[in-house]
Amino acid sequence: MVNPWLAMEAGADPAERIRTVRRAHEAFLADGTVSPPVRQVVADSWRRSARAHATSDGAAPVELDEPTLRSYRDAHPLARAMPVFRELLGSIAHDGAHLLAVCDPQGRLLWVEGHPGVVRRAERMNFVVGARWDERHAGTNAPGTALAADHAVQIFAAEHYNRRVQPWTCAAAPLHDLRTGRLLGAVDISGGDHLASPHSLALVQATARAAEAHLATCTGELGDSGACLAALGRDEALLLRDGERLRLGRRHSEIMLLLARHPDGLTGDQLSVLLYGEREMRPVTLRAELSRLRQLVGPLLHSRPYRLDRPVETDLDAVERELAGGDPAAALDAYRGPLLPSSEAPGIRRLRAALEDRLRRALLSARDPDQLRAWSRTPWGEHDLEIWEALVDALPERSPARTASRAAAGRLRTAYGLPRGS
């Protein structure tokens, strides 16, 4: 079976692949259609990039100036993993043909290292520290797509959404906190077409796993006997237990999250209402789902009532703790996105709405422009009129950012059929 995360199968002609994918890329930009030989992971990324109005010719924006970058980078968890990255990828990064880059969960580049000549080449497309390389701002690229898909991936030449990046080939892997499942960022190697090989993808994946284990050892988390569930910003939850990672299906994600939030357990009727609402469902339907889930998680799942055999911490809990402690900045940093965003289960929808409302209220109360701006730049916050208007009030008079924010708020008011503000 062909690995969909690899850029090319063995024996493929790189030059021919570049020509055919470039034609497909131009066709997509012209009419939105995409077909083979474009990989599904790349086609999905192109569509996300187009929906986000990512630039297909411009430069990625620089969001962190040098003083902000320095303090932010020093405090970032991945700073402790840099010795691992440099040990495993350092020789590659300084061989005159490659770059090593590490970004945060928002796709902001925190470290870009390599031979000075290669670094200078990368600067011409704004692949520099402080720049935002998520798909939303830079289009399809290895670190940005690894973050969006939460999977290691290669992006080869013309597969990049932005034409300025198409001379490059990259491989990147996401990095997580092994205890909570929280996304910490991604590690990337960038260079020429020769990186479109299984070896580069395997190398960056192995480096990411080594860095995660190193961070867990540093914080004493590797031996933790608990289990964790990551469900923010993802339709399929990630269960971390005893050092193993298990991606759950959508219904199983809902069940695990609901049981994690009800440690005393739920009867079949209670669980059915939280999953299906008032719809009439045969009890055998739920029992079948629970039986399949038990095959995956084993003795973690008990019955009579349905419950988990140990506390399972969720990334939802982490955000709630920061909010309870009065730290909206930390809560915002821990918030990966809406809880199981595609779920229509009533119990999940209530949890999702309650968390988002608490976090928004905390940001609105704090009136910190950086936090409000960060929320407004997310897919779930870009149409939040109340946040935009609060940002206008929080910014200094005559600030260019205030003028731009007022204009954005005005456009939203018009879109919602409201009178424009003063």
Image (cartoon, grey):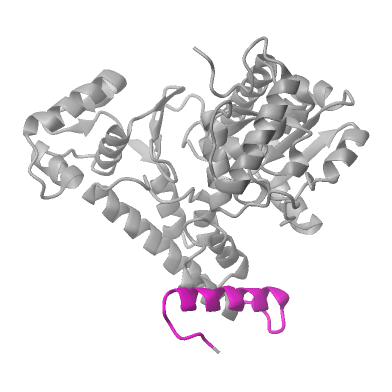
In-front residue for pair 373/217: 373
Q: Is residue 395 magenta?
A: yes
Q: Is residue 418 left or right of residue 97?
A: left
- Which percent across, then down, holds residue 100? 77, 32
Tell me if I can see residue 219 in this picture. no
What residue is at 46 percent from the left and 74 percent from the top?
A: 415
The image shows residue 104 at horizontal and vertical percentages of 64, 44
Residue farthest to the bottom, as pictured: 422
Q: In the figure, 8 relative to 260: above or below?
A: above
Up-down: is 154 above or below 127? above
**Is 208 situated above or below 53?**
above
Decide if residue 223 is on the left or right side of residue 351: right
In the displayed image of the protein, which residue is found farthest to the right? 117
The boundaries of the magenta stretch are 394-421
Identify the residue shown where x is 17% and y is 44%.
Answer: 276
Which residue is drawn at the image coordinates 72% and 47% (left, top)? 73
Please tell me whether the stretch drawn in magenta is mainly helix, strand or loop.
Answer: helix
Find residue 286 and report its horizontal and vertical position in percent: 14, 32
Give the total of numbered labels: 0
Return the residue nearer the eye: 373 or 221.
Answer: 373
Horizontal side, residue 321 vs residue 75: left or right:
left
The answer to whether any part of residue 312 appears in the image is: yes
Q: Residue 172 occupies which quadrant of the picture?
A: top right
Residue 414 lies in magenta, yes or no?
yes
Along the line of sight, which residue is nearer the eye, 89 or 308? 89
Q: Which quadrant is the C terminus positioned in?
A: bottom right
x, y percentage for residue 61?
Answer: 72, 55
Q: Residue at x 69, y 17 (%)?
A: 197
Q: Within the image, what quadrant is residue 14 found in? A: top right
Q: Nearer the viewer, residue 173 or 144?
A: 144
